[in-house]
Image: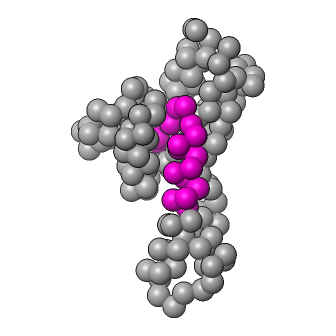
Amino acid sequence: MTKFNVYLSGEIHSDWREEIRTGVESAGDHISFTSPVTDHAASDECGVRILGQEEKPFWKDHKGAKLNAIRTRTAISKADIVVVRFGEKYRQWNAAFEAGYAAALGKMLIVLHPEEFTHALKEVDAAAYAVASEPAQVVELLKYVVYQQ
């Protein structure tokens, strides 16, 4: 049976990643998961923590974004499947970039968002192999891919 590396991208303010991980526990070691740094402050501060403080917020954000891009792009390039979640409460501009990057690399892309976002995300959805509205649907998609070989 093939082992799949799944990258869980996007919204970091809810437990959707854990719901998916728990939901596919029965797949055992046939699915491994990676994800971005989900501690918002740690993600924002990584650049200045590692490379030194900045006077202007733009340069602080720039450093953090560059370091996070290295991490994110590396993880997406190693993934077999990329799940990108667009949450309800916050705008996830990075999620749109990550979905586009995954699609450009030819990764199997699953987009996850509330149904009311369908129109706003129609171009992102068009690049996906599947569009789900609930984490439980992603669980079933992953189980299908793993067990129906």
Q: Position of residue 54 (x, y in %)?
A: 54, 87
In the rendered view of the protein, which quadrant contains the N terminus? top right
Instruction: Work out whether 60 lies above or below 99.
Output: below
The answer to whether residue 58 is left or right of residue 9 is left
Residue 60 vs 140, above or below: the answer is below
Q: Is residue 53 visible?
A: yes
Question: Would residue 133 appear left or right of 53 to someone viewing this image?
Answer: left
Which corner quadrant holds the C terminus?
A: top right
* One can see residue 41 in this view: no
Which residue is depicted at the point 54% across and 70% down?
A: 64
* Above or below 115: residue 27: above
Q: Residue at x 62, y 11 (%)?
A: 147
Q: Position of residue 80 (x, y in %)?
A: 55, 31
Q: Quadrant of residue 3?
A: top right
Q: Quadrant of residue 68?
A: bottom right
16 or 72: nearer the viewer = 72
What main secondary structure does the magenta stretch of the protein show?
helix
User: Which residue lies at the image location 46% right of the left edge and 30% below the top edge?
Assistant: 108
Q: Residue drawn at (58%, 56%), measured in percent from left and top?
A: 71
Point out the stretch of residues depicted in magenta: 68-85
